[in-house]
Image (spheres, rainbow, N blue to C red):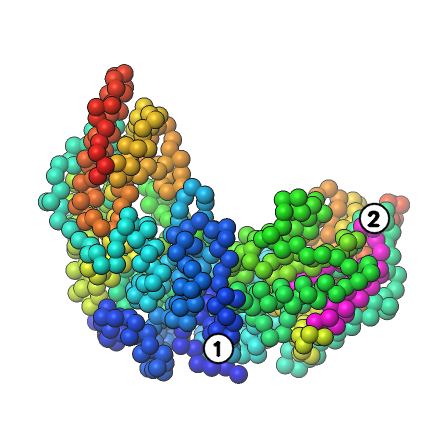
Amino acid sequence: MANSFTRVMSGRNTAVMLASIGAGTLASGYLLSDSTAAAERKRLYPPSADFPDLRKHNNCMAAALTPTIYGSLRDKTTPNNWTLDQCIQTGVDNPGHPFIKTVGMVAGDEESYEVFSELFDPVIKDRHNGYDPRTMKHPTDLDASKITSGMFDERYVLSTRVRTGRSIRGLSLPPACTRSERREVERVVVTALAGLKGDLAGRYYSLGEMSDREQQQLIDDHFLFDKPVSPLLTAAGMARDWPDARGIWHNNEKNFLVWINEEDHTRIISMEKGGNMKRVFERFCRGLKQVEHLIQERGWEFMWNERLGYILTCPSNLGTGLRAGVHIRLPLLSRDPRFKKILDNLRLQKRGTGGVDTAATGDTVDISNLDRLGRSEVELVQLVVDGVNYLIECEKRLERGQDIKIPSPIPQFRK
Amino acid sequence: VSTPNVIMPFGNTHNKLKMNYSAEQEYPDLSQHNNHMAKVLTPEMYANLRDKETSSGFTLDDVIQTGVDNPGHPFIMTVGCVAGDEETYEVFKDLLDPVIEDRHGGYKPSDKHKTDLNPDNLQGGDDLDPNYVLSSRVRTGRSIRGFCLPPHCSRGERRAIENLSIESLDALDGDLKGKYYALKNMTEEEQQQLIDDHFLFDKPVSPLLLASGMARDWPDGRGIWHNDNKTFLVWVNEEDHLRVISMQKGGNMREVFNRFCTGLTKIESLFKERGHEFMWNEHLGYVLTCPSNLGTGLRAGVHVKLPNLSKHEKFGEILKRLRLQKRGTGGVDTAAVGGVFDISNADRLGFSEVELVQMVVDGVNLLVDMEKRLEAGESIDDMMPEQK
């Protein structure tokens, strides 16, 4: 074994010798003879040497990544020089949980989804219920007028919220962007938001520059986001250079909010107390369209294509990137053993009121759509409306001592 | 749409996209920062260095990312930069030379560093009073020439380093004979034993380390080797390729240093037999990931009881003059418990290993004498040392 190592390593000795003489010359030499160094590295470290150890892993990336796929993708880069290893680093570093299946990879730019489609496509399929980007098209529909019965019983629904993300085409995504690109995202978006009027008029608070008072106000309003601590995010490099070019914009009425350069270029949120989902969604769509129009005036657009819908950093947010939800009190139903099955069949998800990974406090739960890709925004919001109305019906029936039924599962698309 | 990948994976600091923007647009906001990198990196320097890279593709932004992401503390001055390979110190010398000078007491680019691992050159050191000195320890790091360093290495390289280390360490014999425990393969029992022995290292949580990319792919390629006597320990692929530690209870620093030198010298020759050497040059001494560990990379220290002296108003001044540093007994960034301090050399570069251990031996002897005086209710004013 010693001999094979000596043989394998000896090829580097020349480079090493040169390095100890004068690395300046070596650096420029390298840039002139890219292919020699590259060939050398490939010879010393074939893909099998670099293939990650995923035996203890439980995420979508680990389930899909084979040595063959790795071998064929390892040496490719997107035009921005983003690599497969950079996409999957977060999934290698975070093996996952036996019960929660995380995605385990991110995109560094729009092209990642194409250059590394051999891995992204099966991951997308796994995460999005069999959606096949090669054969299927994603519908986009932001016409809020189509929503029916979008007003919830406010004895149960305490607040209503719709969020999504948008990426600015031509600029790298948060795992990959340079400081300039991030600052450019901030500039483009803040300029556009400054053009919003009427009930959407508002102002921007840069994370690095806000006063203590502004910070406290944003905390009290539950608007402030902080540097990510989740290793899922930090391992993907999204927290670099914090808090440079990060900030929060909200309208004066405090029901339309934009996060800049957190996990995505932008996260857009429409929310209010009470149960008027139709109005929340209407403002959401209106705000989104206006922002899109404002950036287009300046020659920018959102990342979107008909295979994947809106392009975001995490494959789990492709398509609509939409999570429409309510904080709702369901004291009886939430304790009923059929609750989970009812939610599953309605294609709904429950979370604690602190958001993903938190536990429910008291009887209040956060209920939202499970799906993101393969159904339009209108379809998903309608699904939430119908589903939440059903849950409220169940709660009322239980209050009256009546029995409830598990609804039949909403058909998922399958290829 | 795809182009051949000739570079190492971590971070998109390798991309050339930034060259589409001016240096001013890319320059990091260091206005809240207090670390060596931030003090030194001017916009002009950034502009001059930002298009350079080492032959393995390590860039300026890679060097400084940890310093950008960790502004520092008003009282503690962190380094704020790391090396990704041996060449980093050459390609980015415009940045790293002043950082090194600032961190290592005025060490100039033209200075030469002396390496002395001959334990016979140490005077005394075998009789630090065990009533006060609870334990003695010497550690350093070593990097294997030809491989990228932990912030930058690929999985293949890291595994190659591990395999090479296992082979070499397996060949140690006598009182250095021992065994390797790979972090990802150890049994529950082995893990508990290593914890009880205070040998186990865990995935770094410090943002200083995480931001530089050293924790990637954890625990792949990481492990702990120790001798059967549990007095000689090697960490593989934590913050450096190798961290080598000699330690034992009591005050016989001489014996600890003896074993340290013998072990290191043996390990070095075992690596050489396999065609590898340690990264070393006559200006920087041993080359390690963090500029703070250049030179000897050596921290020689004791856990010592100084309940009275530590409360004396001149304690800090005394340590400074002796070129010593205090830490809590949990290591760097911990507090002292029960009057027991970790006292070690403050310097790494510009003094040889023997010189640094000598400073610790002489210094600790003086501290213990002072402690005894104060215990007896006497003054220590006549014992104040000169600045070394």
Question: Horizontal placement of B219 versus B356: left or right?
Answer: right
Furthest toward the left, the residue is B120
Badge 1 sits on which subunit?
A
Tell me, yes or no, whether the highlighted magenta stretch contains residue A289: yes
Q: Is residue A281 visible?
A: no
Residue under numbered circle 1: A77
Mark 2 or 1 closer to N-term?
A: 1
Which disc, if any, is residue B68?
Answer: none
Return the x and y of residue B219 as percentages of the image width and height: 41, 57
Q: Is residue A295 visible?
A: yes
SS label for mark 2: loop
Q: Quadrant of the C terminus of chain B?
A: top left
Residue in view at x 37 percent, y 70 percent: B53
Which disc, if any, is residue A156?
Answer: 2
Question: Separation of disc 2 and disc 1 at Cα?
Answer: 51 Å
Residue in view at x 55 percent, y 52 percent: A229
Residue in view at x 24 percent, y 62 percent: B279
SS label for mark 1: strand
Determine the image quadrant of residue A304: bottom right
Question: Horizontal placement of A367 versus A170: left or right?
Answer: right
Tell me, yes or no, whether the highlighted magenta stretch contains residue B33: no
What amino acid type is highlighted by mark number 2?
Tyr
Work out whether A319 lies above or below A34: above
The residue segment tinted magenta is: A266-295
Return the x and y of residue B191 as percentages of the image width and height: 38, 47
Q: 10 Å neighbourhood of mark 2: few (<14), some, or many (≥20)?
A: many
Residue in view at x 50 percent, y 53 percent: B31
- Mark toward the viewer: 2 or 1: 1
